[in-house]
Image (tube, rainbow, N blue to C red):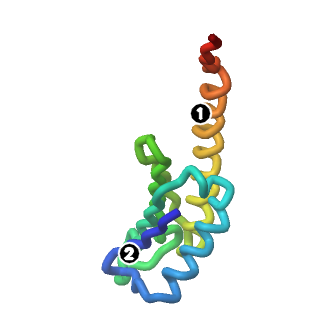
Amino acid sequence: MQIQINTDRNISGHEALSHKVEALIQHALHRFADRITRVEAHLSDVNGAAKPGPHDKRCLLEVRLSGLQPMSVTETAETLEQAVNGASKKMISMLDTSVGRLNKIDRSVPDLETSE
């Protein structure tokens, strides 16, 4: 699973932040790692540095499962860590639903075996 971290101009995208966010995402999405090809996290400060306020940190997570269209969720919170954790929880719920549907479809398709 490849993870890419993107930040806006109001968030310092230093290496420590990238490692922390990457670790949070890997931990949260580890059970889907065999199906996920790429994760992009877009971190931003909604109000900017000049206007701090509650719930102004945003995390948009975009996940690509092999063979499917990308899925995305967004969470805003007081801190980036809270925003990443919230977005990760939303993504887990979305992936549970999507992967569950895929597994159900896979089980409903009969195996076509030819016997001679």
Q: What residue is shown with label 2? A: 7
Q: Characterize the local packing of mark 1: few (<14), some (14-19) or many (20 or more) Cα atoms within 10 angstroms.
A: few
Q: Disc 1 vs disc 2: Cβ atoms closer than 8 Å?
A: no
User: Is 46 in front, or is 93?
Assistant: 93
Q: Is residue 101 left or right of residue 52?
A: right
Residue at the spot 42% in from the left edge and 47% down from the top edge: 70
For residue 58, above or below residue 101: below
Q: CA distance from mark 1 to mark 2?
A: 32 Å
Residue at the spot 41% in from the left edge and 83% down from the top edge: 13
Q: What residue is shown with label 1? A: 102
Q: Quadrant of the C terminus?
A: top right
Q: Quadrant of residue 40?
A: bottom left
> How many numbered marks are there?
2
Residue 16, image x and y in percent? Answer: 52, 88
Residue 17, image x and y in percent? Answer: 51, 83
Residue 55, image x and y in percent? Answer: 52, 68
**Residue type at the position of mark 1:** Leu
Report the mark closest to the observer, 1 or 2.
1
For residue 15, above or below residue 63: below
User: Is 108 in front, or is 9?
Assistant: 108
For residue 62, above or below residue 97: below
Q: Characterize the local packing of mark 2: few (<14), some (14-19) or many (20 or more) Cα atoms within 10 angstroms.
A: some
**Residue type at the position of mark 2:** Thr
